[in-house]
Image: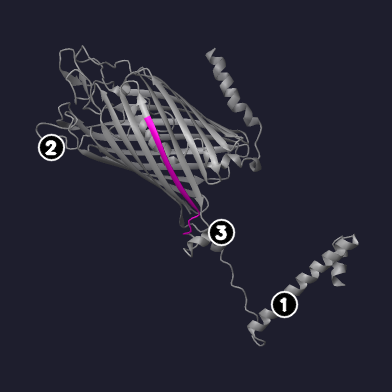
């Protein structure tokens, strides 16, 4: 009867609906009564009801402790073959070998500190054999950059980036790090900000970055002549726009100004008198790059990612790069991608394979020559969700939620006699 | 002609900003395949490859310099 009165008070007019509503109310009332009775019995007839422990603010509000959100590792091998006129591992006036193998392990850890602060720690390491400057100056007869003899050179970087969310629309970020390798020390630091508009449909980003390199100066015979340096300052501005529910675009313009020693100091140039001399570079370089990116979701559960980059600098090098990656999802956890990239550049104004004058600007570096480059490749990605119950009791913060696996292969080849086979493999954990 | 092309590109990019895509219609954009730059470590190793093997580094948010392979 009480149930029917509550049904009427709730505005239920139909008789059948009123009866169902009354039955539900009666059922809830019964369960509530039993629960109260059980609590009373457990507490004992004489003891007062046990008050619930107060919930601490830290339990409701996320504490400002560091919480690891993901750990990703990747290892990539580069197997390079080719010839370039800057290398002395060949005829005096001809191109020398650019054979090299590089093994690059990488680590990335992301962590949150409260609801506003996010940290990203990145540690890439390069293990380079061949064409490395290791052991230079250790022997009177000079080094592997002059002959084809090869040692091993290990280079590592530590980069730490922190992003602080000011409000729902904007954040600021800072990053810094150091790069260490046999003849070189490098420090970098940067800052940036993003501002979202139109409910996040439009995001404007600005960023500045400074890199300072301090490295040994070797001559082309491998002898050391103290140290030299260069600085690189980059400022960029970007705009990201959600155009439709399946389309997002990005444009970015940046300028880099470099000053100091802009070569590695040991590359050589064939001279018209039958010998080799050192490269001669300007002391400054101003680079401009305009980039456009687009990502389009495809109706058959795929995606197309497109990229175009225009580059020009005051050394006379103009370049265009286009890239497209087509991805297809095979299941909710598995997708694959196929990649093609084309790059063409004009080369710097003073590129030569045989320099006539001893003091004029000159380089024979194959990377600064006119060239076309192609990259073709593919990858398979598996994002495997993991039920927390499968992992047992690892603690609230230590449960792996997603396992990420990726394997890919790419072949990079240029029109000026250089190609590279690249194999990459990644494993990630999302907590 | 160049100015018209630039104006057309800017218009194509900026005019959609007049219309907002609601948050509840952005599920497709959250798919990892839709990331503009890809997985960060993969993007970093690719950029390093092109920066060191081609003469067109710098400008777009990353700096040239830092490592003996860079100029």
Label 1: which residue? A34
In whole angstroms, how far apart are the C-alphas of marks 3 and 1? 34 Å
Q: Position of residue A275 (x, y in %)?
A: 15, 17
Q: Where does the magenta region start and end?
A: A398-411
Badge 2 crowding class, 10 Å Cα cut-off, few under 14, some 14 to 19, many 20 or more, is few
Residue closer to the observer: B40 or A338: A338
Badge 1 crowding class, 10 Å Cα cut-off, few under 14, some 14 to 19, many 20 or more, is few
Rendering colour mode: one colour
Q: Is residue A95 magenta?
A: no
Residue A138's label in the rendered image is 2
Quadrant holding the N terminus of chain A: bottom right
Q: Position of residue A30 (x, y in %)?
A: 76, 74
Earlier-in-chain disc, 2 versus 1: 1
Label 3: which residue? A61
Circle 2: element type: loop
- The main secondary structure of the magenta stretch is strand
């Amino acid at each position: 009867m009480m149930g029917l009165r509550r049904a009427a008070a709730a505005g239920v007019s139909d008789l059948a609906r009123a009866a169902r509503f009354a039955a539900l109310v009666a059922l809830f009332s019964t369960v509530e009564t039993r629960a109260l009775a059980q609590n009373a019995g457990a507490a004992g007839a004489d003891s007062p009801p046990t008050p619930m422990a107060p919930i601490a603010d830290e339990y409701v509000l996320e504490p400002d402790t560091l919480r690891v959100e993901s750990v990703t590792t990747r290892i990539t091998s580069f197997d390079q073959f080719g010839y370039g006129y800057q290398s002395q591992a060949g005829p005096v006036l001809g191109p020398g070998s650019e054979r090299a193998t590089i093994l690059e392990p990488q680590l990335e850890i992301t962590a949150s500190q409260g609801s506003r602060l996010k940290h990203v720690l990145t540690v890439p390491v390069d293990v380079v054999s061949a064409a490395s400057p290791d052991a230079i100056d250790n022997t009177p007869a000079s080094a592997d950059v002059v002959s084809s003899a090869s040692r091993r050179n290990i280079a590592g970087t530590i980069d730490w980036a922190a992003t602080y969310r000011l409000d729902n629309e904007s954040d600021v970020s800072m990053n810094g790090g150091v790069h260490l390798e046999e003849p070189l020390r490098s420090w970098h630091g940067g800052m940036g900000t993003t501002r979202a508009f139109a409910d996040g449909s439009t995001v404007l980003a600005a960023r500045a970055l400074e890199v300072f390199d301090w490295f040994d100066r070797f001559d082309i015979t491998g002898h050391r002549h103290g140290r030299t340096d260069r600085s690189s300052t980059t400022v960029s501005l970007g705009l990201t726009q959600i155009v439709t529910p399946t389309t997002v675009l990005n444009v970015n313009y940046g300028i880099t100004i470099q000053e100091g020693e802009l070569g590695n100091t040991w590359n050589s140039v064939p001279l018209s008198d039958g010998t080799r001399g050192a490269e001669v570079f300007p002391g400054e370089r101003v680079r401009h790059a305009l980039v456009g990116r687009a990502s389009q979701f495809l109706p058959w559960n795929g995606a197309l990612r497109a990229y175009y980059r225009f580059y020009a600098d005051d050394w006379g090098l103009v370049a265009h790069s286009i890239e497209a990656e087509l991805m297809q999802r095979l299941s909710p956890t598995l997708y694959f991608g196929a990649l093609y990239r084309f790059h063409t550049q004009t080369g710097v104004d003073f590129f030569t394979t045989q320099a006539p004058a001893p003091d004029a600007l000159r380089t024979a570096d194959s990377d600064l020559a006119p060239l076309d480059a192609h990259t073709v490749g593919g990858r398979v990605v598996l994002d495997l969700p993991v039920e927390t119950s499968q992992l047992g009791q690892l603690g609230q913060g230590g449960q792996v939620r997603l396992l990420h696996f990726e394997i890919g292969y790419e072949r990079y080849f240029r029109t000026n006699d250089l190609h590279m086979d690249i194999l990459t493999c990644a494993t990630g954990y999302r907590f | 002609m160049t100015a018209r092309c630039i104006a057309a590109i800017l218009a194509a990019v900026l005019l959609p900003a007049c219309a907002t895509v609601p948050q509840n219609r952005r599920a497709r954009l959250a798919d990892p395949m839709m990331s503009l730059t890809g997985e960060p470590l993969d993007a970093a190793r690719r950029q390093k490859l092109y920066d060191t093997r081609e003469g067109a580094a710098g400008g777009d948010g990353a700096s040239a310099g830092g490592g003996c392979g860079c100029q």
